[in-house]
Image (cartoon, rainbow, N blue to C red):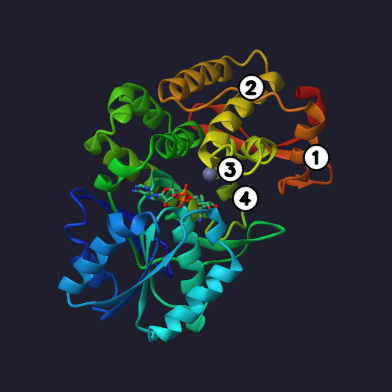
Amino acid sequence: MLTVPVSLSANPYEIVISSDFFPQFGTFFKKWTNGARHAIIISDTNVEPLYAMKIAEILAESGVENDLCVVEAGEESKCVEVAQMLWERLIECGADRKTVITAVGGGVVGDLAGFVAATINRGLPFIQVPTTLLAQVDSSVGGKTGINIPQGKNLVGAFWQPKGVFMDMAVLRTLDERQYRAGMAEVVKYGVIMDADFFAFLEKNVEKINSRDESILSQIIARCCALKAEVVLEDERETSGRRAILNYGHTFGHVVEKLGGFGTWLHGEGVGIGMTFAARLALKLDPENSELKELQKRQDALLEMLRIPTRIPDFPRDEILNTMLRDKKTENGTLRFVLPNRLGDCVMKTIQGIEKFI
Ligand SMILES: NC(=O)c1ccc[n+]([C@@H]2O[C@H](COP(=O)([O-])OP(=O)(O)OC[C@H]3O[C@@H](n4cnc5c(N)ncnc54)[C@H](O)[C@@H]3O)[C@@H](O)[C@H]2O)c1
Ligand SMILES: [Zn+2]
């Protein structure tokens, strides 16, 4: 079992990474909540039979009364109607200030349940049990919660830190191949933006990663959580700009997600293509830089070995430009892009005349 501390001064908490299906979840639940006696588990239709029922059993065995609320699997559930349904269910289930909202699922369930926890009764304690690779390395760490509205994704939300995050490697066995690879794109991202040694570790362990070796995966996930926690500690509420480095590959990734049409590309697949684009853009801006040449070569090779998409789709150039300029990182017509300096180091750069590079 590995533990990663998230040492926020107001809300310190820990991330526990176990194997063999949550053997100590009950113990940690009690420790993190000062012995709370009531939990409401929020999950989705896919994860309920796989893991949420198991979590309910473990809590019951630990003397924690619990109710289970299940939403439809999929991004569509991150909406105000489903949030409202949950607010009402929570009250019907007798939620009071000591009730612990427990999210069991991927990033959709985590964001939605976290938002509901942040808003019901002016905020209830919250625990995350992330079950996708993406949720384990990214969305469950850092306290961002939220829902979508027709005007855009994640436009309504709150920073709401969990009391603890409990993840188990064994749940990754049932994750489908595409979801697994998409989550792995975010893993590669951490190596490129923050940690060249970690990137080399990934290169060395490609085969084990592809066969979902749980011992390697737990080390990888622990490292990603520690790196994300480091950034979140420096910039908890996205005010200094530091947290923006986590958006490496995301500006162009969003273009791919949008122009590809809803549901065509998974978010992580967009990130793989977006990182490929960003590495090329960095090199176009500084063509003789040998560190950037090496980065591009190694990043391309690693993404390919991990079977993460890198080929930039043939979208019309005008549509790419328009979509990019509408992205939230645009300020006064110039584009802000997270670009690598070298493996393990990146910065936010302002780019004028992006059309020259597309
Ligand atoms: N809060 C943040 O900081 C943050 C960061 C990144 C992404 N996100 C959000 O995360 C969401 C995407 O999360 P996601 O990629 O986990 O998607 P998801 O929650 O939709 O999960 C993907 C699919 O896998 C299923 N699933 C989950 N765990 C499983 C398992 N162990 N075995 C089999 N199937 C399983 C789900 O039911 C779903 O169908 C987006 O809404 C995004 O905005 C939030
Ligand atoms: Zn992402």
Residue linked to disc 2: 280
Q: Distance between the residues labelled 3 and 4?
A: 30 Å
What label does residue 334 carry, if any? 1
* Amino acid type shown at disc 4: Gly
For label 2, the crowd category at 10 Å Cα-Cα, with few meaning under 14, some 14 to 19 and many 20 or more, is many
Q: Which of marks 4 and 2 is in front?
A: 2
Identity, as a three-letter code, of the amino acid under mark 3 = Gly
SS class of the residue under badge 3?
loop
Structural distance between the alpha carbons of marks 1 and 3:
29 Å
Viewer-closest of 291 and 304: 304
* Residue at image coords 53%, 31%: 272
Q: Earlier in the sequence, mark 4 or mark 2?
A: 4
Q: Can residue 208 be seen in this view?
A: yes
Residue receiving disc 4: 241
User: Between disc 2 and disc 3, whose residue precedes?
Assistant: 3
Residue type of the residue flagged with mark 1? Thr
In primary-sequence order, the first of circles 1 and 3 is 3
Q: Are marks 1 and 4 in contact (CB under 8 Å)?
A: no
Pinpoint residue 339: horizontal percent, then vertical percent. Answer: 62, 32
